[in-house]
Amino acid sequence: MSAYDKLPKITEPELIAKEYSARESWRVFEIMSEFVDSTERLKDISPAVSIFGSARTKSDSPYYHLAEEIARALSDAGFSVITGGGPGIMEAGNKGAYYGKSPSIGLNIQLPHEQHTNPYQDISQTFHHFFARKVMFVKFASAYVVLPGGFGTMDELMEALTLVQTGKTRRIPIILVCEPFWRGMLDWFRAVMVAEKMIDPGDMNLIQVIDDPKDVVTAIFKHYEARGFEPSPTEREIQLNL
């Protein structure tokens, strides 16, 4: 029997597991590259506002037209506008900003369905990882403007509320647009979460509900009138640990 024959044999499941482990390790570098690349590309867009809403909203929807109008008002007021870069409300947000005075930014994600890049982007950044993309939405936003949407929109909204509530990011305006759409959720927050002490009554003040585009812009400026848009040194340190 040769020395080779005496070596322990690696089974196919073990080989697959080793290959998967190696791929997982190298994936860390891919994630790092997404953070580095997107941070470099977006570092000069401040002040910026992130707009969220459904990818399924059609261009003839009142929600679409409202998102476009809000984005145009924000852009003309000097805010870069950040969206998820896809169709629906995202397209409306990019479109409004694209024809305004400030940059239109799309943070695109590769998905099996729904997502395709809309053409109204001055800066387009594509992500493979949802969590890296979500960090960029918060990291560069001076405010969140949230229109009607589905699970993805709710995910971004709850992420922002959680980060602000827990002090893991600075306090920013979180504005819900189209009050009838959000009414049931907000009533439930008060009637159940506040009543059962799952959140503090003051946590409801993290949310504003504003339907008029001009009032959206005014509310954001009001929030920053005493302090300016740039994060303080302490806030910058906090954001490094998002």
Image (spheres, grey):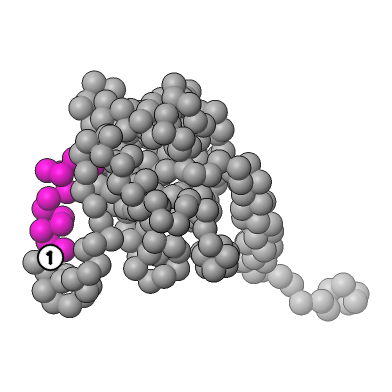
Residue 177 located left or right of residue 168? left
Q: Residues within 10 Å of mark 1 (few under 14, many from 20)?
A: some
Residue at coordinates 42% horizontally, 29% vertically from top-left? 76
Residue 70 located left or right of residue 185? right
Residue 122 located left or right of residue 141? right
Q: Amino acid at mark 1?
A: Arg
Of residues 224 and 101, the one drawn nearer to the viewer in this rendering? 224
Q: Residue 127's spot in the image, x, y percent?
A: 55, 44
Asked if 206 appears above or below 199 in the picture, the reply is: above
Numbered label tally: 1
In which quarter of the view is residue 54 placed? top left
Q: Which residues are magenta?
A: 177-189
Mark 1 — residue? 190
In which quarter of the view is residue 199 placed? bottom left
Quadrant for the N terminus, please: bottom right
Q: Residue 143's spot in the image, x, y percent?
A: 39, 49
Of residues 85 and 216, the one drawn nearer to the viewer in this rendering? 216
Residue at coordinates 18% horizontally, 71% vertically from top-left? 201
Q: Residue 225's spot in the image, x, y percent?
A: 39, 51
Asked if 91 appears above or below 140 in the picture, the reply is: above
